[in-house]
Each structure stands twice: as C-alpha cells, then as structure tokens.
Amino acid sequence: MDILDAIILGIVQGLTEFLPVSSSGHLELGKAILGDTSVPEESLLFTVVLHFATALSTIVVFRKDVWEILRGLFQFEWNEESQFSIKIIISMLPAVFVGLFFEEQLESFFGGNVRFVGFMLLITAVLLYFADRAKDTDKKVSFKNAFIVGVSQAIAMLPGISRSGATISTSVLLGVDKSKAARFSFLMVVPLIIGKIAKDLIGGELNFNGENNIAMGAGFLAAFIAGLAACTWMIQIVRKSKLSYFAVYCLIVGLIAIFYGYLVP
C-alpha cells in the first residue's frame, strides 16, 4: 500500500470513527477508490490497525472515564463505577463471540465490496432516522440494554453498518438519554479493539511485513491525530445535532456506493 494512500485512509478513519456514518464502510470505499488490491486478510488487518489508533485517541480524550471504569473493576464494591464497568463487559460479549467463531467469514467482507457497503449504509440511514424520532429522556444504560447494544455492535462489525450509529440508535430507541448513549458507545469499543489486537499479537496472526510496515505506521499516526481532533469536537455534534442529518448523509453515500459498485465491478 502506498504511504500517501495509507495517510488518507488514516485521516478518513480518524474523522469518521466518532460520527454515525460507518468508519469501516468509508475505509472500504476509500480502498476501492484508491485502488487497494490487498487480499481480504491484509485489508482487515489495516482496518484493525486504524481502529486501534482511534481507540487510543478515545482513551486519551476519555482518560477520566477510562480510569473510572478500571477503578470500578478493582474496587469490589457495588457502586456506580463498578456497575458501569460490568455493563461495558456485558456489551462486549456478542462481538467477542462473533470475533472468535466467525472471524474468517467476517474477513471476506473486507475486500472492497462497494455494493455491499452501500446497502449496509442504507440500513444505517434507516436506523438513524428512526432513532431521531425517539423521545428525549434522562434514562441510563441498564444491564439488559448493555447486552442489546452489544448485539448491535456485533452486527456493526460488517463494513457499512456504523458501529456508533447502530449502538447509539439502539440505545436511544431503548429510551436511553442521547448523551449517555454517545458516551457509552464510544467507551464500549475501547476494550474490544485492545482485546482484538492482544489476541492477534499473542496468536501471531498479525503478519506485518517490511513492505507494508511503514505505510501502516503512517496510517496509524494519521488516524490517531485525526481521531484526537475529531473526538474533542465531533462528539458534541453527535450529542446536539439531529441524527437525521447523518441518516441523509448515509443514504446519499450508500446510493452513490451502490451506483459506483455496479458501474465499476
């Protein structure tokens, strides 16, 4: 992969990770437009690396929240911090299950299938539209809600289904406050990404080669820096703006992707 292409894709990842528009979907569209010819396994590896970069930027921005989660795990007291930590763990279970037992099937979707991404973006648009019509509340994420939102996160592992869009929309449709839903959505993915990286490192599945190391490093750095900038100001957009704006965006990009996919097979 060309270094400039990796930087462009890194910036795309960093900017789109925190908006409900599917960062993985945009990455796949970007790869197709830039002519990425890597096999699905390498393509998914690059996607994981970029997601790890934005996970680190999330940790930096939400460092106080992350510390509260860690503290809650080791306090051994049934307080708000420990309950929130358990909810984060519960939300991870569906995605962990999919990652452990359906990893090969998942890899097959990361080969630049533009039409598939387009159709998934349309589903994201529908989710955001209905979530935008939900009434505002001050309800927190419950244990049951955490698992249901976790199922949405697992489904959102498909490129084109926005992870933040699916999880925030599911939370809001369940009656959770939009701000609390956004905070939970951004925090619940951090241990999942770090766990994925740790698993692949221990298992020797991250096959970095000298030819792509520099490009991946450049993409990682670009995604991390862009993620820092995006997370500090874009999260306010998610909290305050109407989700229907993003629904329209996903609808337009999804239709363009489908048209492009049929035009350039």
Image (cartoon, rainbow, N blue to C red):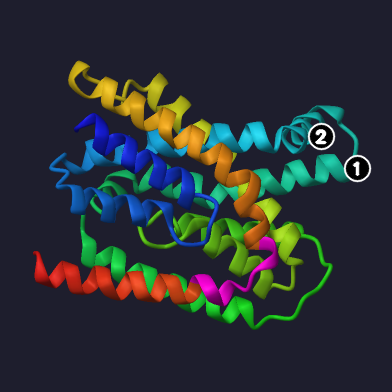
Q: In the rendered image, is residue 192 in sight?
A: no
Residue at figure coordinates x 46%, y 77% from the top left: 248
The mark that comes first in sequence, 1 or 2, is 2
User: In which quarter of the view is residue 122 placed?
Assistant: bottom left
- 175 inside magenta stretch: no
Image quarter (top left, top right, bottom left or bottom right) of the N terminus: top left
**Amino acid at pointer 2:** Gly
- Residue 250's label in the rendered image is none
* Residue at position x 22%, y 67% in the image: 115
Furthest residue toward top: 210
> x%, y% of residue 102?
35, 48
Amino acid, disc 1: Asn
Q: Nearer the viewer, residue 29 or 119?
A: 29
In this rendered view, identify the residue nearer to me: 115 or 221. Answer: 221
**How would you classify the magenta stretch by its main secondary structure?**
helix
In the rendered image, which residue does mark 1 sit on? Answer: 79
Q: Is residue 43 above or below residue 164?
A: above
For residue 72, the mark is 2
The span shown in magenta is: 239-246
The secondary structure type at the circle numbered 1 is loop
- Callout 2 secondary element: helix
Contact, CB < 8 Å: mark 1 with mark 2?
yes
Q: Position of residue 213 (x, y in %)?
A: 27, 21
